[in-house]
Image (cartoon, rainbow, N blue to C red):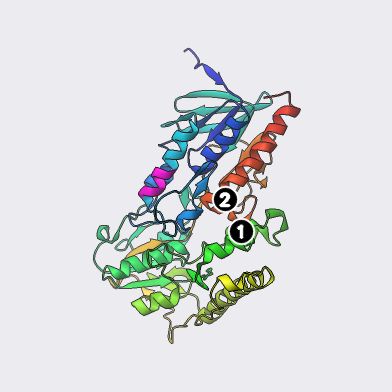
Amino acid sequence: MRSRAIESVTTIVIGAGHAGLAASHFLDERSIDHVVLERGEVANSWRRERWDSFRLLTPNWQSRLPGHHYDGPDPDGYMTMGEVIAFIERFATLSRAPVRTGTTVTSVRRADGGYHVTTDRGDYRCRTVVIASGACNLPSVPGFAGAVPGSVEQLTPFGYRGPDQLPDGGVLVVGASATGVQLAAELRRSGRPVTLSVGEHVRMPRTYRGRDVLWWMDASGVWDEPFDRIDDLTRARRLPSPQLVGTPERTTLDLNALASMGVEIVGRWAAVRDGRALFSGGLRNVFSLADLKMRRLLDTFDEWARTHGRDAEVGPPEEFTASRVPERARLQLDLRSGEIRTIVWATGFRPDYGWLDVPVIDAKGLLRHEGGVVDSPGLYALGLPVLRRRRSTFIHGVEADAREVIDHLARHLAVRGGA
């Protein structure tokens, strides 16, 4: 049996989303030969792993990649899923990124001072690898989901497209991050009874003092805080996404808004026992902590505006109603009664590194890295939460990250004998 030919290239980039394409841009700028391997199509996760009504949380003017930015008629709007795909595709075309679509990486391992990359369409030998496959490859679902009665349909945001696909009846949404509150609102507007299970969450108004709250994050420099100055970096990287939604009306979607819509709020889902969902108490403390952290963030904005002479160009400071604690939040729910027909697990995501045959994964299944420099010479990462700064999570945060990571990669190549 004849062995497959092995193609040699200096750098392999895994993933053709915004992070992988940004890496390609800076590799090309430094004349480092490379290929970008993508299991599906360009912007594959945006095409396959978002619901139909999805919009970005960031305003359009913040949508930018190296040498490419939003130039449409609605800078303060929020891109739809189709617009995000078109934006990333356009960047791939303009940058002439050497993308090989329909190519699934099945193994990356150390070999000959570099790496051997195996795919379903051939093998590669390279000196460096940039992992840009994303942090949200697999949904995180608690183990007790297996104890839910079979009469209740279960799905994650990866499988959810819209209310019409769900059976009639009540829906239990688990998780109060951006995804959870958006899906709870959409399902409630469809006329369904909705219960939302709430644990730790990040409350944030859509606008503050007349400006989008993410304008404040950008202008005040909060988003630019580097990873090595964050007190509890592990916690920062695991925080749920803020309770935001992108709508033409710039609506705030917090727990008060959901309660006003008729969504029932319960505590964190702790266990299943005899067909019953058991919820934690202590919602008052959970709400108070989220309110306190929001107020501290808004105080940071106020202080920045005051010390930088910007008070005159924005509105006056605002106060927000405290999160309303339900008078009698249920502590359990009988999943056999027919009240709940569907559970949507909006409980977060995790990366999938099953193909990475290099010992750089910690006990929680996460990459060991220092600002995107992985714990193996010549191995790098992009597109992970708070990779090099707080804005890393968002599309417009990848440019600075990619520039710095590729700078490190280029120095590594130079030390090892040139690109």
Q: Earlier in the sequence, mark 2 or mark 1?
A: 1
Residue 80 lies in the magenta-colored region: no
- Residue 148 location, x and y as percent? 38, 63
235 relative position to 210: left or right: right
Task: Read off the residue under disc 2.
Answer: 397
Start and end of the magenta stretch?
82-87
Q: Is residue 280 visible?
A: yes
Q: Return the residue found at the far front.
A: 312
| Rendering quarter of residue 41 | top left
Secondary structure at badge 2 equals helix
Question: For this rendering, which residue is in front, 8 or 303?
Answer: 303
* Residue at point 56%, 30% (across, down): 12
Residue nearer the viewer, 4 or 90: 90
User: Residue 205 vs residue 289: left or right?
Assistant: left
- What type is the residue that disc 1 sits on? Trp
Q: Main secondary structure of the magenta part?
A: helix
Q: Position of residue 364 (x, y in %)?
A: 60, 52
State whether residue 83 is above or below residue 174: above
**Image vertical order of residue 7 relative to residue 132, above or below:** above
Question: Which residue, given by chain and number where applicable, does mark 1 sit on?
Answer: 223
Across and down, in percent, residue 140 comes to 48, 56
Q: Are marks 2 and 1 in contact (CB under 8 Å)?
A: yes
Instruction: Give the vertical position of 144 relative to 132 (above or below).
Output: below
**Where on the picture, by quarter, is residue 130?**
top right
